Amino acid sequence: MTKTAMRYTNWGLSMLVGIGIFLFWYLAYPHALSYQEQYQLFLWTWDYFLERISLPGGLADWLGEFIVQFYYLEWLGALLLALLFATLQRLTAKLLPNGFWCLFSLVPPAMLLWLMGDINVLLSLPVAIVLSLALCSIRMPKQLSIADIIIVPIAYWLIGPAVWIYVILRSLQWGWWRKEESGKRKEEGGMWMAKGYRLLVIGYLLFVQLATYAWLLPQWPLQMAMTGLNYYRIPLHYPQLKGYDKDMYELIRLDYLVRQERWDEIVHRAAAYQVHTPLWSNCVNLALAEKRLLADRMFDFYQSGEDALIIPRTRDLTSMLPSAEAFWRLGMVNSAQRYMFDTQEAILNARSSGRCTKRIAECMIVNGHYKTATKQTALLRKSLFYRCWAEEAERLMKDESKINAHPVYGRLRQLRYKDSFLYNYEEIDKMLGLLFQNNPQNKMALDYFMAQMLLKGNMQGFVEYMGWVQQYGGYRQMPLGYQDVMRCIQARGNVAGSPYAKYVKRMMERRNQP
């Protein structure tokens, strides 16, 4: 293959990788990009850069977060990922021999794409791999030199343990046999010199890692110092090579759709595919409530149990987000703030969340806690995509009348509780009923109140408060779901084909299990 043909082939492969990666993320997995973006808050400050660069792998970590902030716009995030993967392919091709070997340059991008199916793999790992390959592409002397002695510790501090890629490939540049300038006669002992060179370079990198751990990172586990501090979101864990789990990514997609307020799409997807978890039920029920379909169609879909509307406080990354969104729209502002704060504190790599920080600030604005809200907006002003909102929020906080007239904040001030009381999840139905009593215009609170009694099996309470539905529900006739419930109550659950009867039977069987 001629040099010209080789050059065009490599460029063709790079374009293939770039276009494929862009379409993969933008069309198939935009929700995965949103998921990664919402668990960090990149700040354009010198202090933020110094904080990241103060640990091994800090530059790769900082560059990874720099790219992830653009995931806020899915098309832009997918484009940057396409460029990153295309760069990986180009650097790999540069290190391979000419000819058909260039096809093997597709292997690293494919393997990395599969690895990123684990949602806890941070972009700092792909960035570190690309930076390490970029170092390999720099022309260096074939023998061990002063440059290697200097580059290895610096590269380890900047990109982390991915520098092993550089060290291994660098050692392979020293051939098994050395030739004299004539290029004809094999030098005796060359193979042993090559082996000694490899051992020397590998031993030197091990020494650098252990010395860094002993002198600069004693508070970190040795395992993390050797394998990477910021490549994986969960400390002392490693990527799960399971690809793209359908159920898990469906839950991520539903949370993404809730964030985007795309209620019709949630209901449409729920009719086609169900995931039997409380998170799934929370998202679908919230979409139904927003479309005023909760009373009619609630039991057409899977209900996880008493936690199908609002789940109890759970310290993980995603479970509480749909409940926090429901609290926010219901007018339970303090509960929304608490759930968002707990979610942010549950981020295991100790990052802030742009999504959570913004909602926490909004809750504080609704409650009139402007000084504490300003602390949150001050952070958001140092970001790229949240800055405009933060500046507008700070202008609003200077004028109480504008907040009261705001279509969201003013409405929530009318819906929220008038009196203080202790939150008790076990009595969530009573809290929802009290919320509706405070403002009978809060039809979402009425729908959630009646639905929660059905989930708990409180038939007597449901019948007792049907008067509220007739008086304040705004329905021309009793919703179909409530009609089905009334038939079940009258027939003591013996209604063939009833969605609610099926739910009651399933819950009774679950409770009777040992």
Image (tube, rainbow, N blue to C red):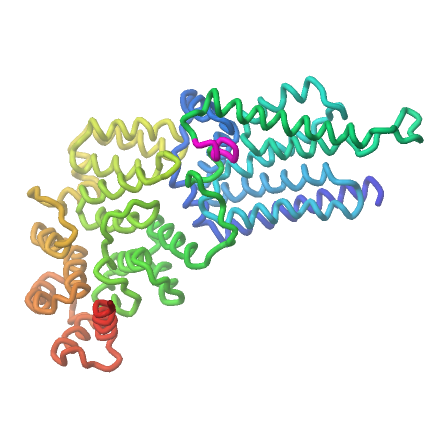
Q: Residue furthest top?
A: 146
Taking the spot 37% from the left edge, 64% from the top edge, the residue there is 274
Dominant SS of magenta comes to: helix
Q: Position of residue 250 (x, y in %)?
A: 41, 57
* Residue 362 vertical placement versus 24 (above, below): above
Horizontal and vertical percent position of residue 64: 50, 34
Q: Is residue 43 above or below residue 425?
A: above
Extent of the magenta region: 221-228
Which of 401 and 258 lies nearest the eye of the viewer?
A: 258
Which quadrant, please, contains the N terminus?
Answer: top right
Q: Quadrant of the C terminus?
A: bottom left
Does residue 112 belong to the magenta stretch?
no
Q: Position of residue 152 (x, y in %)?
A: 62, 24
Side of 77 where 274 appears, left or right: left
Q: In the rendered view, does 67 fall on the left or right side of 326? A: right
Viewer-closest of 164 and 368 = 164
On screen, residue 398 above or below 459: above
x 45%, y 25%: residue: 217
Q: Where's residue 108, x and y in %?
A: 63, 45
On screen, residue 219 versus residue 461, left or right, reads right
Residue nearest the viewer, comparing 347 with 476: 347
**Image quadrant assignment for residue 500:** bottom left
Determine whether 18 is above or below 505 in the image: above
At 13% across and 49% down in the image, what residue appears? 424
